[in-house]
Image (cartoon, rainbow, N blue to C red):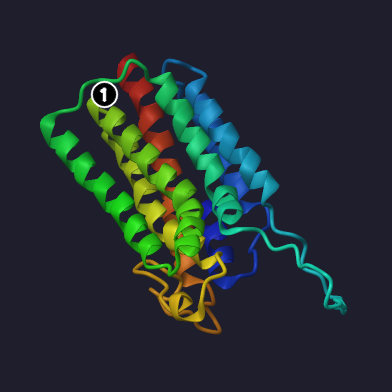
Amino acid sequence: MFAAAHVAGVLLAVPVWRYAEVASLGLALVHAVLVGLPAPRWAVPAFLTVLLVDAVRTVPAVPGDSYGWQVLSPGDAADVPSGFEVALAACWAPIVAVVLLLIAWRPWPRPSRAVAVAALLTGFLVTGYAAVRASASGSADDVWTVSLAVLPAVALGLAGLALAMVLAGTGDRLAAAGALLLTVVALPNIDSSIAGVLLPYNVQQSTGLFGWDLIRPSLSLPQPMPALTTALEMTAYLLMVAGLTGRRSRQDA
């Protein structure tokens, strides 16, 4: 319910409840502790704690009723974050959370041939899409800037893919599906990262295959693509928690 409220807030560009994401992840942590934590017992709480820290950090501000003017002189420099900073702010928490789970489940099981081939193809899809988008950015300096901007999203996709392989090898298919969803989330994050880079006008016209205009926004629903990305991301987390706590239930049985 809280996850749905968080997604609805992103879709409408107005929070339904400011603490919806925090509540959703907090309840997932409580659920994991009550149902039973798989060994090692620190893994799932550490995973969710990192996500909770980021959720608290990004709680939407209280909507204000007052408006004001800000006057800038020609010599003033606007403090605009780089594309890399924007992407890192969006991706650091899931990257760290996934890496913690990868550390927890060492030694990693050897994947089957089918899983390895599927992972290899998916990895090529993520890295290849990022490379194609970066190479179409214009000058050499622009290509370098865009390449840096997409690094966090690519890292998220590859980390999620590695975790999906590990979880598939241990038989945790539900959790593996959640990790694989994080790889899917990396694709729109690549395009949103590039959108945060100041590029020539003719390059900015291309928003990519998974950009903000994949689903056309409207006055009533101004952010459909960010909302879809958020929905996939929240679903990934909840599937991973359900699958990993289900592992403990199967072990106890």
At horizontal 26% and vertical 23% (from top left) the residue drawn is 170
Is 135 or 127 nearer to us in this picture? 135
Q: Which residue is at the front of the view, 239 or 67?
A: 67
Q: Quadrant of the C terminus?
A: top left
Would you place residue 219 above or below residue 118 in this image? Answer: below
Residue under numbered circle 1 = 170
Q: Position of residue 16 (x, y in %)?
A: 63, 64
Rendering coords of residue 181 (x, y %): 35, 48
* SS for dot 1: loop
User: Relative to 203, does residue 35 appear above or below in the rendering?
Assistant: above
Q: In this view, which residue lies farthest toward the left?
A: 113
Q: Residues within 10 Å of mark 1 (few under 14, many from 20)?
A: some
Q: Is residue 86 left or right of residue 67?
A: left
Among all residues in the image, which is located at the extreme bottom?
219
Residue 58, x across and y down, in percent: 67, 51
The extreme front residue here reads: 140
Residue 204 can be seen in this image: yes
195 lies above or below 3: below
Q: Which quarter of the picture shows residue 6?
A: bottom right
Residue positioned 51% across, 67% down in the render:
195
Q: Residue at x 61, y 39 (%)?
A: 52
Q: Is residue 219 left or right of residue 239?
A: right
Left or right of 196? Residue 53 is right
Lateral position of residue 68 relative to residue 123, left or right: right
Identify residue type, mark 1.
Thr
* Residue 234 seen: no
Q: Residue 196 at x, y = what percent?
A: 56, 64
Q: How many marks?
A: 1
Where residue 71 sits, quadrant-wise, is bottom right
